[in-house]
Image: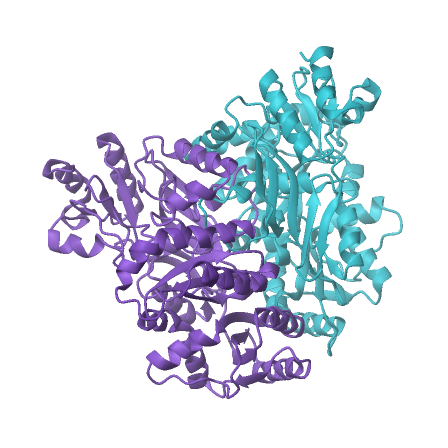
Chain colours: A cyan, B purple
Amino acid sequence: MIDAEIVQRFREILGPKGVIDDPDDVAPWLSDWRGRYKGASAAILSPANTDEVAATVRLAAELGVPLVPQGGNTSMVGGATPPVDGSALILSLRRMNRIRTLSPENNLAVCEAGVILSTLHEAALAAGRRFPLSLGAKGSATVGGLVSTNAGGTQVLRHGSMRALVEGIEAVLPDGAIFDGLSALRKDNRGYDIRQLLVGAEGTLGVVTAAALRLVPAIADRAVGWAGVAGPEDALRLLRHLEARLGDAVEGFEIIADDGLGHVLSHIPGTRSPIATRTPWHVLVEADYAERREPDARALLETALGEALEAGIIADAAIAENEAQAEAFWRIRESLSEAERAQGPALQFDVSVPVADMPAFMTGAAAAAEAAFPGSTASSFGHLGDGNVHFHVRAPRGTPDGPAWIKAEGETISAFVHDTVVAAGGSISAEHGIGQMKRAELARLASPARLSALRGIKAAFDPKGLFNPGKLIP
Amino acid sequence: MIDAEIVQRFREILGPKGVIDDPDDVAPWLSDWRGRYKGASAAILSPANTDEVAATVRLAAELGVPLVPQGGNTSMVGGATPPVDGSALILSLRRMNRIRTLSPENNLAVCEAGVILSTLHEAALAAGRRFPLSLGAKGSATVGGLVSTNAGGTQVLRHGSMRALVEGIEAVLPDGAIFDGLSALRKDNRGYDIRQLLVGAEGTLGVVTAAALRLVPAIADRAVGWAGVAGPEDALRLLRHLEARLGDAVEGFEIIADDGLGHVLSHIPGTRSPIATRTPWHVLVEADYAERREPDARALLETALGEALEAGIIADAAIAENEAQAEAFWRIRESLSEAERAQGPALQFDVSVPVADMPAFMTGAAAAAEAAFPGSTASSFGHLGDGNVHFHVRAPRGTPDGPAWIKAEGETISAFVHDTVVAAGGSISAEHGIGQMKRAELARLASPARLSALRGIKAAFDPKGLFNPGKLIP
């Protein structure tokens, strides 16, 4: 247990602004935003710069105090929630929120860990560039958290996840040493890639204090379309067709089941189906160009969708006539989780398999889950082109007590879905990470070689186990 | 020392074809192709499949025999040469040379470690795709070596180095466990990225037995141009201009000093300057398109170079009229090392700095080296767009004994150049790796945080130090 004396030691190095221990101020940061995990902590440590982070880490090592790094606290897997026993302190990076440099010439932004994603978006746009990664939590999620969880989103198809966008990292390692890998070298073969190791490490190998992030040209011309298809197979055929026609301009490609669309139309006011034909599956597609050309994006997408219609790949299609309509199309996709929650209790899985295998997985896994758990319904939506969907198993209609159903069935259904994923050569965490939510399942399903590598690396960096205890490493 | 009894133990698990111990057959693999390093080894172990590799590794662990993984043995830094004391055996992957699958639909080739790069090139082309990484040693270099050294080349600007092209890895770890990370998942957040850790590990963390590699569409339309510029600053301006006009079609962008061109014209028969104007620096540029369009690649590049001429960014330019001329332009670039060797003794450095800083580095470092070592001349050429050049310091004209000069001055000049690189925030190894050649310099120049991370990871994977001893880890 952390006592007042220990907190005082940190206050001596961080000053009064650097330590928050009023329980009312600490409380909001003790649970995750979905309310699934609740921890305890005597204080939030909030250093103002990298040197203060290093001093904090050294003192914590000296005192044997575990630290839970935290950015915007938007983890989907309880990755930033402290242990329940109050044994750890929260290490918040939110005060380190400076964009150190932003160079449009070099397409590079060096951001401190606490920079909020939407702030980076705005700064990049103001400089005629953009940072091509976005997600629902963009108003809270921070650069440090995005790096540490290798965040994804809807633009991975073209631009990759954070791993591909990080050109440099500054971090404080568990021994208090500052790892200065911020210099944005496009080529660097001085041994193991420590930067890539810190990406997605969920704060278990140290704490990311800043990152050099790649920017891309701003969008000059954009087209958003909607297509109705018979199934995921045809959706993937459509993607390959669009890639052949539009190249890597295809930036968004999301698949949505018709029942998911139905839930949005039922529960989200002001939404309507973009197409008149009722089809079992839908695809939202966006093509983006950095320059204006003739034919423009809309004409190119229209032609390509027309060809797909003629070839029988799709059954119907619509192109957004203007920005408002484009936003309306995207709103359907972005409201899916909310609509599903309004519809009833469900277990949600963030899984991936090889792209080519995803159509068979989507239909096969849903049928298998429905057969194994009579009365439940299963479907998926999301990033087909990345081989990553969010797979939902919904409680039988009329289930009176959602949380009780989840408590009773959650573990069995999770094991079933994860076993199906593993059998398909896939990953039980595509973009959300492991955190505390999937730790036991990782232990159950990872190969001995992977587990021993994870444990070995963890022990090499953090032999005392002080960084984000209880997360990731089984 | 390895005796016949030990070799016999390996023969029992690998069969007669799996062990080469006739000294005449072993000899060619004991030194690097540049003849800088010469080791000794009683035998080459040559397993036929992954299970045999695992059995070999387990037996080696049991017997305490160090292993030196070897592919095409084309390392630039002595990375695949065994220790001189004969204490290790060579673990050759050359028999594992099967392309397991090649799927044009999925843009993916799963290759065993011993597949030779040019074989992969041909197989991809036959399927209407290409593998977008090439280098001088493509007729010998193998997939396993390319992965293990994170190889680069002249297409990194657009497609990245091996790190970006590897979608999956199968490896045998030092404890003999098979790490099966071959499933090509575009998204996988199950903790630390073990695959990325094995890329560029130079065989010190285990041995790569197969890799899933990303293919891209074949080139349908190609344009190759040459431009004369006043200096590296203008060359970088030209690159930015071409990127603004041609987007990521710009696949090759190589800078060459006029003295380097002069050496090629002097020493390589049949070469001529592509432009009539004498300029201090030159740029070779290639733009590639996967589809034919109007205007075509040549017209697009011609227009863009014309604009650059008008804007005063370049002084002269030429476009290759046909494939033969395109090859002739590239031949100049590819003959640079050979021409430099013919010109006289030189020390060669493979270094990187942030792209934006490279022009100042190229001119500044050359001037500094020439001032520090009177009589010597220095210049650089290579991948400006990656912030990576090959920097040469040549012996004073008329130096009678090249090797003696290198022996006398090598260490001092190396230290000088590397210090200059580190001061510029750069890397002493951009694409060639550390091997045995740069190990001492890495120890001297890497930050304590990096060194301790490298050592910690090595110890976690290979506590007995049996994998590629004497390489990479100081």
The residue nearer to you, when weighing A309 against B166, is B166
Which residue ends up furthest to the right in the rendered image? A270
Image height of A376 relative to B271, above or below? above
Whether residue B34 is visible here, answered yes or no, is no
Please name the residue shown 74% across and 47% down the image: A99
* Residue B291 pos. (x, y %): 56, 76
Q: Which quarter of the figure is the N terminus of chain A placed in?
A: top right
Quadrant of residue A180 in the image? top right
The residue nearer to you, when weighing A164 against A135, is A164
* Residue A62 pos. (x, y %): 59, 18
Left or right of residue A351, residue B214 in this image: left
* Residue A115 pos. (x, y %): 74, 42
Image height of B158 relative to B12, above or below? below
Left or right of residue A358, residue A230 in this image: right
The residue nearer to you, when weighing A122 against B351, is B351
* Residue B135 pos. (x, y %): 40, 65
Whether residue A2 is visible here, answered yes or no, is yes
